[in-house]
Amino acid sequence: MNALGEFLRARREAITPAEVGLPTGSRRRTPGLRRGELAELAGVSVEYLTRLERGRDRHPSAQVLGALADALRLSSHERVHLHRLVKAGGGALCPASTAPLPVRPTVLALLDRLEPTPAFVADAQGDVLACTDGFRWLAGPAGLLDADQPNLARFVFGDARARTAFPEWERVADDHAAALRAAADLGDGAAAMLAEELSITAGAEFGRRFAASAVPAGTGVEQWQHPEAGTLRLAYESLGVPGDEDHRLVVYVPATEPLPDSPRDPRPPG
């Protein structure tokens, strides 16, 4: 048995049938769920779950692990631990990618010219590499920029604050899953690695969107909930930046028909 198998078995034995909506029988010889019960909840075979728990299969897919995490009702902390166990064991995840390529000075100069409009530059996997002060005003209070390397998809699917920041969270989640799927399908290793991570840490919330996603439109309208300005309705354009970096410039402007009680200008004062 390896660390991953031990963790899965321990969590299976720690969760009660009642917690997952199953009847509690009187003839249980082991605590928690039976393998067959967990296998049915996760949509895998009992034989495969047995191989995982005994360490005979060390390369489960991220989708399988995400389904098991959902079935076991893992907390966000436990999902992160599961993800780390897979990485440490050389399992489902792709090899680590290279560091993000820096934003060219001319593109940074363009961002400066866009102030105070909310705008940012991101790479194919959704890392926010540079942004205007206007975007910091818009996204900072939501927590999107708190991480050392902010990532759009990781925030949308991994941070509970995203559901408050985006009143139309379901649609925003669809869009970011589609963008990640498109990048992964085109061979971006970092995007593929992040997709596998989110398949585990976010489970079905991400997995079903990633599997069914279409090509991202690159333009549209988003609603943002801002603590000072209220509900903002912003149109955005995602523009590919020429060059080998595979960067994109995203710019927000007020939508032509703002919602009632929302300001027409989302920019910070001054």
Image (tube, rainbow, N blue to C red):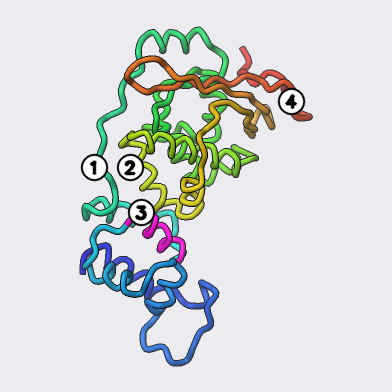
Residue at numbered disc 1: 95
- At label 2, the amino acid type is Met
Q: Residue at x 47, y 35 (%)?
A: 179
Q: Tell whether position 66 is magenta.
A: yes
The main secondary structure of the magenta stretch is helix
Using a 10 Å C-alpha cutoff, classify the residue at mark 3 as few (fewer than 14 neighbours), some (14 to 19) or many (20 or more). Answer: many
Instruction: Single out the residue that lies furthest toward the bottom.
Output: 27
Mark 2 and mark 1 lie on one chain; the one further toward the N terminus is 1
Q: Residue at x 21, y 52 (%)?
A: 90
Question: Residue 162, how many percent across, how many down?
Answer: 55, 41
Q: Tell whether position 88 is magenta.
A: no
- At label 1, the amino acid type is Pro
Using a 10 Å C-alpha cutoff, classify the residue at mark 2 as few (fewer than 14 neighbours), some (14 to 19) or many (20 or more). Answer: many
Residue at numbered disc 2: 193
Residue 175 in the image: above or below residue 121: below
- At label 3, the amino acid type is Ala
Residue at numbered disc 3: 62
Q: CA distance from mark 2 to mark 1?
A: 8 Å
Asked whether the viewer can see residue 81, the reply is: no
Mark 4 and mark 3 lie on one chain; the one further toward the N terminus is 3
Q: CA distance from mark 2 to mark 4?
A: 38 Å
Mark 3 and mark 2 lie on one chain; the one further toward the N terminus is 3
Residue 30 in the image: above or below residue 73: below
Residue at numbered disc 4: 258
